[in-house]
Image (cartoon, rainbow, N blue to C red):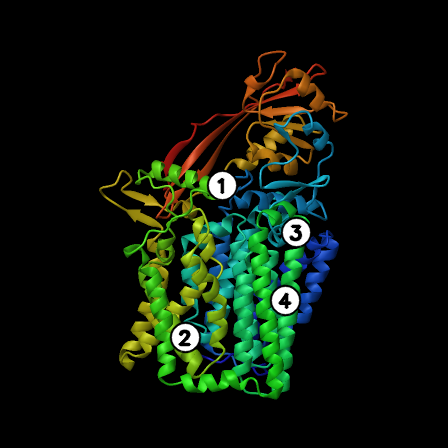
Amino acid sequence: MTHPAPSSAPAGAAPRSARALVTAPERVVLVLVILALAAGGWAAVGLHQPWTVLPTAALGAWAAWRIVPSPAAVTAADRRGALAALVGTGVWTVVNGALYAEYLIVVRDPGFLTLAGLWLVHHPSSDIPTLGAIDAAGVDGSVLADASQAWNLRGDAVQPQGARMLSALIAVGGWLGGDHGVLVANVVVGAVGILAVYALARRVLGPLAALAPAAAVALSVSHIGLSRAAYTEPLTLVLALAAALWLWRGVEERSTGALLLGAAAAGATSFIRIDGALIAAGLLAATVLALALTEGSRRRRTRDALSAIGLQAAVLYAGYAALWRWSEGYADRLADQGQRLMAGYGLLAVVLAAWALTWLAGGDRLATGTWRLLRGRGAIAAGAGVAGLLLLLASRPLWMVARRSTTDPVDQFTNSVVESFQRAQGLPVDPTRTYYEQSVAWLSYYLTWPLVLLGILGFALITVWMVRRRPGWALLLGAVMPSSLLYFWNAEVVPDQIWAFRRFEPVTLPGFAIAAAVAAWWIVDRLRPSWRLVGRRVAAGAFVVLPLTTWVSIQPASDLPVSGATPVFVREMGGAYDQIRALCDVAPDRPIILAGTSSHFGSLRVMCDEPTVLQLAALDPSQVADMASAWDTAPVVLTRSPDWFDWTADPEVVVTSTVRQASYQLQAIPRTYFDRDYAWYAGIVNDDGTLTPVAPGAAAAGPADTEVTSP
């Protein structure tokens, strides 16, 4: 059932081309992880430039190359499995790269993450100078030099929200391919995520069976949708699974290099997401436990444990320091959560380090003695406990309804959003519902219930095998279980899909896919020998066919009898790029007064690279003139509300655009989209505060806010 990792090969043990092919999937993962570490690291110190990032990444990849060992022998199955993984991932990249998202209007996180990436293509840090916008905003409280939450002032600069590693990484795509290189870069990250699933699964399933969970993740609607736009979760998936793989190798093969690289990758999740400490903590605890249970010199195991703890903690806390430096407003808003995560992680690291030090005096017997006692019935009880807990969480819709408060201001806002979704879908209006009791069911939207149930069985088997014979299984459990169980209970997210499923994309989705494959091949191995080949083919087919069934919904009695999954068939925010570029071309080389919605503030400031202020209400002409006096050049006003201003002539629309966006769907994958029409007016501010209209350009208008089923 499980297969040990290949050992390093002597020269000539297998053709070099064959060994290169077999190691290629993991080495692609290695290169991306090193590049992400280099990009995120240099962005953290404000020196994100091609001449810093690329040489560092090249040197790091060269130094870490041998962490991926060449196999002692190469079988036909090894070659076929690696080739299928590479070819399949290549096809996936081309198909999804053709439908990359144009998430350049800030409605949710991919907007400011993409724009931060575009900014970092040409700038060494993500701080965006205000260039007079603060003075211009001083005329009235309704004028801002930043925009709510996504863009926050720190001194004389505007900071995009969130951690920087993903934006820094996709900016590398901009060095290679311009704006479109940035937009398509996260598709490449998602593709490498598929190879990360394959590489980790290959360690326990073998080269051909490992294709099954990789295919299930690749074909899941969530992985497709979250990879096409600049969501942080696919990169978190890559780092988390790569860390689990290398830590596992470091423990079982006594490879200090693999152990340290895995620790660094796990710690670096804090450079991507504020909750990175959850994944890092699970992997750290699993690593120390596996080292305690592994045979070998106590001195070496103690050294390895302390090295992993120290390096991972240093990288993790550096990520949180970088978050505070480059997104202070966001860090302050989530200070309570961040402090709890850092304090909890720190306490765990100290306890584990103290325990590891006792190993020199035999303190590891606490673990080894318990392990020996549990090897019999205790192992089965532990496995049953894991399965029982997951089944209990899955059953929650039968016996509870989760709700949020009505007193907290954030909860009040979320309640209003959920109510709007419920009314739009014709659901019973119950705005305090979180829908968190259905969190395990969310997983079934993308993997289907058969694979989810197989995953539960697989985790039970993995727990039994970890206790009975292979402590390294703890690395898979440690990577997946802590954050999965926490978010199954309380996802802390607006519950529309696929937005809510972001919580489960990095480790839960691939973890359940791998566990389901473990269970499926275990069941096949219980069949009669003459049936096993057919059983393996059926199992492999299920991991392809079942996720594909979620792409299309057939409901004859519905208003939409046949509908497709919007994240698969529709380009998210298609039309946004051309709209922003057209707005920048209306009156180039002028400061911008954006009058109206805040969604375009960062879009215009970054893509036009001109100082920008946000005006949220109508002003007197004298106030407009005072605002314009902050700059030597008369600014251009861009607005969808022309009645806010006095014009020297009747203004005409200068830019029209239709932007397509997926609908917000509760309790299902979104299968509709909105075509949203924009009509923009522009005027140059005169000395008296009136506007001289800008001559209109040719553009075609489309229907406003029309909801359409995806093909």
Q: Which mark is residue 462?
A: 2
Q: Which residue lies furthest to the right in this view?
A: 632
Classify 10 Å Cα crowding around label 3: few (below 14), some (14-19), many (20 and above): some
CB of mark 1 within 8 Å of CB of mark 3? no
How far apart marks 3 and 2 lie (CA) works out to 39 Å
Task: Tell which tag, 1 or 4, sits nearer the viewer.
Answer: 1
- The kind of residue tagged 2 is Ile
Give coordinates of residue 261: x percent, y percent: 62, 70
Residue at (34% x, 36% y) in the render: 423
In terms of sequence position, does the residue under pointer 1 or pointer 2 come before the other?
A: 1
The CA span between labels 1 and 2 is 43 Å
Specify the amino acid type for callout 3: Trp
Q: Name the image quarter holding the N terminus.
A: bottom left
- Element at badge 1? helix
Q: In which quarter of the image is residue 534?
A: bottom left
**In the picture shown, does residue 136 fall above or below 278?**
above
Left or right: where does residue 434 sit relative to residue 186?
left
SS for dot 2: helix
Answer yes or no: is residue 451 visible. no
Q: Where is residue 359 in the image (x, y as percent from the top left)?
A: 59, 84
Within 10 Å of disc 2 (Cα), the crowding (few <14, some 14-19, many 20+) is many
Question: Among all residues in the image, which is located at the extreme left?
Answer: 557
Name the residue tied to disc 3: 324
Mark 3 vs mark 4, CA separation in Å:
17 Å
Secondary element at image label 3 = helix
Q: Residue at x 65, y 36 (%)?
A: 605
Task: Check disc 1 and report the residue beneath it.
Answer: 409
Closer-to-camera residue (339/197) = 339
Mark 4 highlights which residue?
A: 313
Please name which of the two marks, 1 or 2, marks the residue nearer to the observer: 1
